[in-house]
């Protein structure tokens, strides 16, 4: 769940306030693009310690489950010791793929989110969950955003795909396609699986930053694992408060880029005449890939 992914309906039901009713981030400090200063020195020793606990848990889970490019990029980032400095990562990221990180206080408007992506800027939330939220948060924090999303931005094909998604989002705002495009984001960038010579692997940030779903999506026999098809993905509903009932599997990042690069205008018009499919549906003739051993 991307920090700024108020992109569409998939965060429509997620509150932007904590249990106390206070905003997670201070929006009064944001500029017109909802960008803030990270204020890294303000993070407490307890927050850095919590980051280390979160990192240690996920680092033990990703071998044999995450795709190789994620594992390699995460290792190169070397952010196991505490909450990373966005400016340092931005410098390395810009040299690698021309992207930059921008700090944001939390969820931002759809148009702002798409504008950032279209200009190769990835928004990362500045606040970190509290200790009692170790296993579950209802809105994305800095651990989800940075750990889950940033490593793949060092892959040039994936980085180009995300920029094109941002451009497509700006168009979708005018074409009644936002809900459909949100499903694409949800089932790929957040909860996507990818083929590898060793079997299915994870590239979706929502899974990579989760303590439980990273095992469930690959080895539980209950969820569907369906080869990626853009129209099918855009028709499919999803879960926001439980593990997914369906995952879509790409062959590689080149497929993700090529299949989502065309103009979706006619596809939106077509899909808006059809009913959405349940999250656990399996259509006649579809392949349901088996769980990994």
Image (cartoon, grey):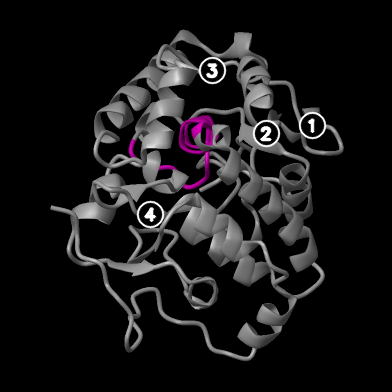
In the rendered view, does 265 fall on the left or right side of 188?
Answer: right
Give the residue pinned by disc 3. 84
From the image, state whether disc 3 or disc 2 is nearer to you. Answer: 3
In the picture shown, does residue 281 fall above or below 163?
below
Q: Earlier in the sequence, mark 3 or mark 2?
A: 3
- Given residues 130 and 180, the one toward you in this image is 180
Q: Mark 1 to mark 3: distance in Å? A: 20 Å
Q: Mark 1 to mark 4: distance in Å? A: 35 Å
Q: Which residues are magenta?
A: 135-151
Which circle marks residue 193 in the picture? 4
Q: Mark 3 to mark 4: distance in Å? A: 26 Å
From the image, state whether disc 1 or disc 3 is nearer to you. Answer: 3
Q: Position of residue 214 (x, y in %)?
A: 30, 46
In the picture shown, does residue 87 fall above or below 246?
above
Q: Position of residue 258 (x, y in %)?
A: 59, 60
- Given residues 112 and 77, the one toward you in this image is 77
Q: Mark 3 to mark 2: distance in Å? A: 16 Å
Whether label 1 touches label 2, CB < 8 Å: yes
| Residue at 42% over, 35% down | 70
Q: Circle 4 — which element?
A: strand
Give the residue pinned by disc 1. 30
Q: Is residue 21 visible?
A: yes
Q: Circle 3 — which element?
A: loop
């Amino acid at each position: 769940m991307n920090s700024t992914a108020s992109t569409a309906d998939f965060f429509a039901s997620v509150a932007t306030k904590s249990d106390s009713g206070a905003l997670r981030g201070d929006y009064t400090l944001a500029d017109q693009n909802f960008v803030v200063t990270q204020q890294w020195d303000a993070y407490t020793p307890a927050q850095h310690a919590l980051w280390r606990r979160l990192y240690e848990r996920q680092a033990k889970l990703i071998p044999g489950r995450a795709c190789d490019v994620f594992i390699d990029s995460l290792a190169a980032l070397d952010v196991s010791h505490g909450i990373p400095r966005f400016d340092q990562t931005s410098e390395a990221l810009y040299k690698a793929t021309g992207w930059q990180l921008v700090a944001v206080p939390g969820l931002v408007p759809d148009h702002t989110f798409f504008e950032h992506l279209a200009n190769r800027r990835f928004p990362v939330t500045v606040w970190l969950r509290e200790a009692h939220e170790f296993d579950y948060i209802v809105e994305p924090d800095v651990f989800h955003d940075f750990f889950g999303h940033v490593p793949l931005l060092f892959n040039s094909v994936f980085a180009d795909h995300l920029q094109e998604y941002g451009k497509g989002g700006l168009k979708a705002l005018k074409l009644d396609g936002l809900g459909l495009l949100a499903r694409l984001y949800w089932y790929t960038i957040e909860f996507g699986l990818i083929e590898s010579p060793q079997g299915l692997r994870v590239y979706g940030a929502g899974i990579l930053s989760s303590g439980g779903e990273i095992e469930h999506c690959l080895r539980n026999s209950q969820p569907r694992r369906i080869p990626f098809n853009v129209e099918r993905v855009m028709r499919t509903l999803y879960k926001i408060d439980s593990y997914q009932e369906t995952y879509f599997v790409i062959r590689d990042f080149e497929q993700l880029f090529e299949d989502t690069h065309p103009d979706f205008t006619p596809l939106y018009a077509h899909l808006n005449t059809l009913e959405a499919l349940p999250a656990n549906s399996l259509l006649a003739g579809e392949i349901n890939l088996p769980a990994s051993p």
